[in-house]
């Protein structure tokens, strides 16, 4: 699999998977007589973009235990091994975001959702596979106070959130020196252009999050030589851009401008910037299925004649221009953990032997509740409650 340049034209194949002829056009021509591509089902282009601010999340025992009961046992155990509470909350928030997105889009109960990871550790939906949305995929990122999710039922997608804070143990210049090989000379010119040191740090993370969002979308990890990717950050992006996404960032791969990938950037607040990478459908089917270890099905003999043709590619480019641009500009929606849990079904118990020798009438915070409002707790909660929130130094 080639994950950067040598993509195949799979536009018609995608249409075939969805039961649509990519050469179909809307029967009603425009006033100027120009026919447009046939509209696809609206949910096909509905992307989820959610954020959870874990700095504002102070779990209660019942809430933490309910969250643990709605995720897979191996993920619960992984979260239980974190040293700091903030890392456990970020990881738990990420799993809850994924499961909520799967249930919403695929239309299944949480108990039926099976998640796993590719060999590059990219999470994906193993079961149930959606016949309606075979390319449904998602990506999660966390840093600082936030955990984010993006999902798309039709386009391969990636996200990265960056925590913009000065490094504690070194100067910004020394930090840049250590990261020199991660950016091209042109990118370093942009990063170092601001006169103010903090502004230069912002430019660094804006470029870094763009690169991360791309490599997370294609699922190759940091094995990819980042110097092959050259980004220009959106010049309109400011720390006040939380209300909408800025979409003028560009990508060059091996020196060649790639207009098939779309990028969106925003700030959640003055210390957190986000980048979203959205790949075109012709790239998505083949690469995504290969990423998760599934061989893309062959088109049958009676498949639409336009499979792999220029006509199918132009059709999807038109769809991108008309529909995807609107989706990319929509801001992130901030959700609470209670909102993520409100319809989540439990898939298991918190402990191997729940409430047998492992549970006690516990405390919430430093206050003992009255007897009539005491809540049961167990090892999993006590383990979390005993953790320090975060390290004193990064």
Image (cartoon, grey):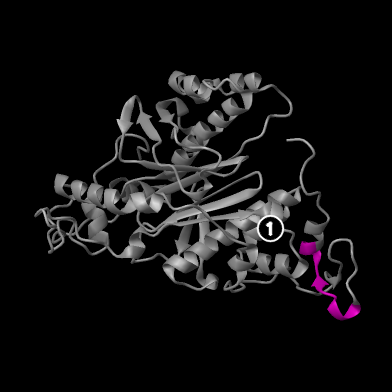
User: Residue 242: horizontal and vertical position, in percent?
Assistant: 53, 47
- Residue at 65%, 23% (x, y): give it: 172
357 relative position to 72: left or right:
right
Q: Is residue 133 visible?
A: no
Name, please, the residue furthest toward the bottom: 372
**Can you say which quadrant of the picture contains the N terminus?**
top left
Figure check: 196 above or below 393: above
The residue that label 1 is drawn on is 77
Part of the protein shown in magenta:
371-381
User: Residue 115: horizontal and vertical position, in percent?
Assistant: 52, 60
User: Residue 259: horizontal and vertical position, in percent?
Assistant: 30, 37
- Residue at 70%, 58% (x, y): give it: 57
220 relative position to 19: left or right:
right
Quadrant position of residue 151: bottom left
**Can you say which quadrant of the picture contains the C terminus?**
top right
Question: Considering depth in this image, is 193 or 16 the residue closer to the camera?
Answer: 193
Question: Considering depth in this image, is 48 or 68 the residue closer to the camera?
Answer: 48
User: Residue 193: horizontal and vertical position, in percent?
Assistant: 51, 20
């Amino acid at each position: 699999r080639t994950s950067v340049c040598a993509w195949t034209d799979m536009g018609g194949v995608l249409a075939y998977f969805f039961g649509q002829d990519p050469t179909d056009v809307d029967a009603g021509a425009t006033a100027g007589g120009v026919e447009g591509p046939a509209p696809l089902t609206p949910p096909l282009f509905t992307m989820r973009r959610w954020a959870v601010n874990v700095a504002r999340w102070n779990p209660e025992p019942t809430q933490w235990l309910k969250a643990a009961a709605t995720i897979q046992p191996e993920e619960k155990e992984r979260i239980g091994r974190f040293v700091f509470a903030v890392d456990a909350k970020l990881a738990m928030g990420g799993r809850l975001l994924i499961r909520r997105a799967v249930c919403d889009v695929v239309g299944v109960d949480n108990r039926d959702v099976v998640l796993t990871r590719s060999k590059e550790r990219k999470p994906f939906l193993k079961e149930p596979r959606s016949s309606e949305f075979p390319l449904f995929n998602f990506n999660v990122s966390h840093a600082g106070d936030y955990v984010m999710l993006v999902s798309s039922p039709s386009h391969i997608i990636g996200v990265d959130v960056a925590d913009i804070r000065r490094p504690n143990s070194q100067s910004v210049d020394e930090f840049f020196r250590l990261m020199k090989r991660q950016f091209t000379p042109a990118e370093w010119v942009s990063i170092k252009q601001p006169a103010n040191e903090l502004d230069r740090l912002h430019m660094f993370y804006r470029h870094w999050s763009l690169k991360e969002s791309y490599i997370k979308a294609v699922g190759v990890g940091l094995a990819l030589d980042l110097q092959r990717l050259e980004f220009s950050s959106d010049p309109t992006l400011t720390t006040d851009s939380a209300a909408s996404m800025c979409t003028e960032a560009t990508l060059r791969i091996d020196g060649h401008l790639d207009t098939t990938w779309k990028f969106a950037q925003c700030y959640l607040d003055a210390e957190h910037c986000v980048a979203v990478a959205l790949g075109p459908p012709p790239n998505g089917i083949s690469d995504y299925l290969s990423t998760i270890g599934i061989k893309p099905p062959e088109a049958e003999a009676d498949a639409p004649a336009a499979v792999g043709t220029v006509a199918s590619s132009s059709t999807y480019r038109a769809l991108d221009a008309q529909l995807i641009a609107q989706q990319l500009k929509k801001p992130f929606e901030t959700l609470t953990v209670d909102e993520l849990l409100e319809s989540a079904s439990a898939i298991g118990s918190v402990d191997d032997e729940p409430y047998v020798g492992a549970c006690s009438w516990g405390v919430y915070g430093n206050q003992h509740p009255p007897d009539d409002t005491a809540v049961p707790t167990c090892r999993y909660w006590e383990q979390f409650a005993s953790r320090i929130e975060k390290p004193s130094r990064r």
